[in-house]
Image (cartoon, rainbow, N blue to C red):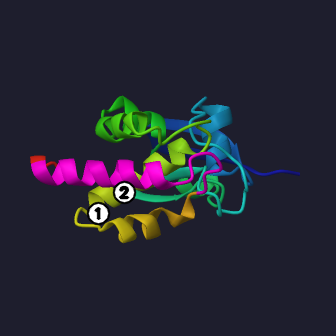
Amino acid sequence: MEEFFETTITVNGTPVTRRVAARTHLVDFLREELGLTGSHTACEHGVCGACTLRVDGQILRGCLMLAVQANGRKVDTIEGLSDAGEIRDLQAAFHERNALQCGFCTPGVLMTAQELLRDRPEATRDEIREFMSGNLCRCTGYQAIIDSIEAVLIARRRTGRL
């Protein structure tokens, strides 16, 4: 018999309380209970990065965290970052450089890239490549992704938006 727990998570700034099955992964809770389908499930082993979310300010894999573990925590999704305008320049750079094709990996890549931009504003191209190595993409070949992130880093340094 499956156990359920009342869980309250602040998702994109809004507190949400639900009864959640003990084994429900955070990414599945967001997709199925809240309709936030930007983060994807793919490998379900934390390897591909498609399910990347931000919990209490740090990115993690939504397939490796249970929803009940997020009780009392703050979760940001790609929808939240996008709606708040936090990644507007990053999204524009991806569009301009064709750093997205099918779009499946893009939310996780953008979430990871935003953490890099926030926490490592002096990152070199090699450091960008290393930081992004946990996000898999089958379409772009990565060059355009790295180019986009590097362009935003340079632009943010120039404008002081770090």
| Labelled disc at residue 138 | none
**Where is 159 relative to 133, above or below?**
above
At a point 32% along the width and 33% down the height, the residue shown is 84
Work out whether residue 96 or residue 20 is closer to the camera in this orientation and state it. 96
Q: Horizontal and vertical percent for residue 60?
A: 52, 60
Disc 1, disc 2: CB below 8 Å?
Answer: yes
Q: Amino acid at mark 1?
A: Asp
Q: Say whether residue 143 is left or right of residue 34.
A: left
Q: In the image, which disc is placed on residue 115?
A: 2
Q: Amino acid at mark 2?
A: Glu
In the image, what residue occupies the spot 56% across and 36% down? 38
Mark 1, Cα crowd under 10 Å, few <14 / some 14-19 / many 20+, is: few
Badge 2: few (under 14), some or many (20 or more) residues near its Cα, within 10 Å?
some
Camera-nearest residue between 68 and 31: 31
Report the magenta residues as a range: 136-158
Q: Is 139 one of the magenta-colored residues? A: yes
The residue that appears at 49% across and 50% down in the rendered structure is: 109
| Mark 1–mark 2 distance (CA, rounded to whole Å) | 6 Å
Image quadrant of residue 63? bottom right
